[in-house]
Every structure is written in structure tokens, then in C-alpha cells.
Image: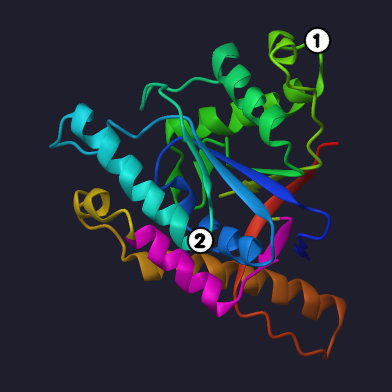
Amino acid sequence: MVDLFSPDGIERMLCVVAHPDDMEYGASAAVAEWTARGVEVAYLLLTAGEAGIRDMYPAEVGPLRAKEQRKACEIVGVEHLTILDLPDGMLEPSIEVRSRIAGEIRRFRPQAVMCTSWELEVPWGLNHADHRAAGLATVDAIRDADNPWIFPQQLSEGLTAWSTRWLLVTGSEPTHAIELSRESVEKGVASLEAHEVYLRALPGHIPPREIVEGAAASGAAALRETRSAADEGGTHTHEYALGVRAIAMG
């Protein structure tokens, strides 16, 4: 059963992912939807994705991918982008990583945090090691941020403990769906297309429109199926939605 997830009561959302482009495989369309409604969204990228282009040196790739990510953020209305210097391809759900995520949660004080799935197997195959590590570290960091005795040095720096209400997981079996307008889907497509050099370096990459529209259509189909089962004979016109696993955290 997939229920509709509303941004009501959510003023700020923090999105935590491993690399530039990770938000753009469908999730950025939901970001565009929410920023258009007045929700403030920040991105925290744990690495610069510097190891992502085989034929270019990491020292060149990191700044290039950051530039492409800034353009993608502008398209969907994200004004807060932080890119950490953790090593691409070797990310671990370590104490250091948890501390840095928890610090950002305490600074931004979001009601919702979005991250990628930490499962090994995902709908499109085997999940990237960095994506798994980012997801696990984010789960733990949400709890860490709410405990004043975890990373207490951050509180001496002027931060305070913060309880995040919702964890929204992408790339997982959905429990909820975020309804999307056509305009938001178009912005989602454009945000993925903004990673121009990176996508060009991936042979046989599926066109961005096919990826984003496919994800949005799949989420909407799951939502329509649930609504139809609950209300036989009713007409449900959800055309686009992002499927997420919504977990109540606090």
C-alpha cells in the first residue's frame, strides 16, 4: 500500500547523498515540487564524485562535477549546497561521516531528511557501495543529531540537538509517494541533463527524460493502484509521483 506523502508541516528538508547527480535520478523532481511550495531544501554531498569519470584525473573531475551540481540545484530551487571532501568510491558509514552529517542536521534543522537506499539490492540491480554507506550513515546521524551526548563538541560550537521528524528513502520499496506536477518533472529532467560532461562519459546511459519520467510514472502507478483498491470505482488522476519509503523518526 502506497499513501500520499504531503509536505504539510515541513519547512526544511536536507538531502544527503554520496555524489553529484545522485539526487537527479528522480528525486530532484520532488525537490522542485516542494521548493515551489515554499519548502527550503539543502543538499549535502559527502564526496565530490572525483572518481566518477574514468578518462579524466580526479583533480579535474571534482570541480567539474561541483559546477554541474550547482547548475542542477539552481534548476530545482536549491540554494544550499555543501560538498564534503570525503573520498569518492571509499565512503564508509564511519563515526567521522556520521559526525559531519549530524552537524549539518543540527545546523539546518530539517523536519525531513532524504537519502538513498542502504540495501545491497535495489530495483535497478546492485547498489553502489557509496550509496549504501551514505544511507546507513544518514540513518545513524539523524539519531546522533537528536542526542546531546553524541558529538557534544558541536553543541559547544553553538549548535543544539535536533529531532528530525521524517526520513525519506529513495530507491527502496515505497510506502508513500510525493505527487509531482508536470512542471516539476520537467525540472527534474533538466537537472539530470545539467550533468552534461559526466553523462557523456557513461557509454549507453539511458536518456535523462526516460529515467526521470519513468521513475515519476512508476510512483504514480503505485499510488493510483492503492487509491483504486481503497475506493473501487473512483477516478484517480495521479500522473506523476516519486515513490519513497517514509520512516517516522521523531
Residue 32: which quarter of the image? Answer: bottom right
Q: Which residue lies at the image location 40% right of the left edge and 42% below the top edge?
A: 20
Q: Which mark is residue 76?
A: 2
Relative to 147, residue 173 above or below: below
- Per the image, is 221 magenta? no
Q: Which residues are magenta?
A: 175-193
Q: Amino acid at mark 1?
A: Trp
Q: Which residue is mark 1?
A: 149
Q: Residue 15: x percent and y percent?
A: 59, 43
Q: Residue 42: x percent and y percent?
A: 58, 44
Q: Is residue 86 left or right of residue 228?
A: left
Counting labels gives 2
Q: Earlier in the sequence, mark 2 or mark 1?
A: 2
Q: Which residue lies at the image location 63% right of the left edge and 30% below the top edge?
A: 138
Residue 139: which quarter of the image? Answer: top right
The secondary element bearing badge 2 is classed as helix
The secondary element bearing badge 1 is classed as loop
**Mark 1 surroundings: few (<14), some (14-19) or many (≥20) residues within 10 A:** few
Q: Is residue 193 left or right of residue 156?
A: left
Q: Residue 26: x percent and y percent?
A: 50, 59
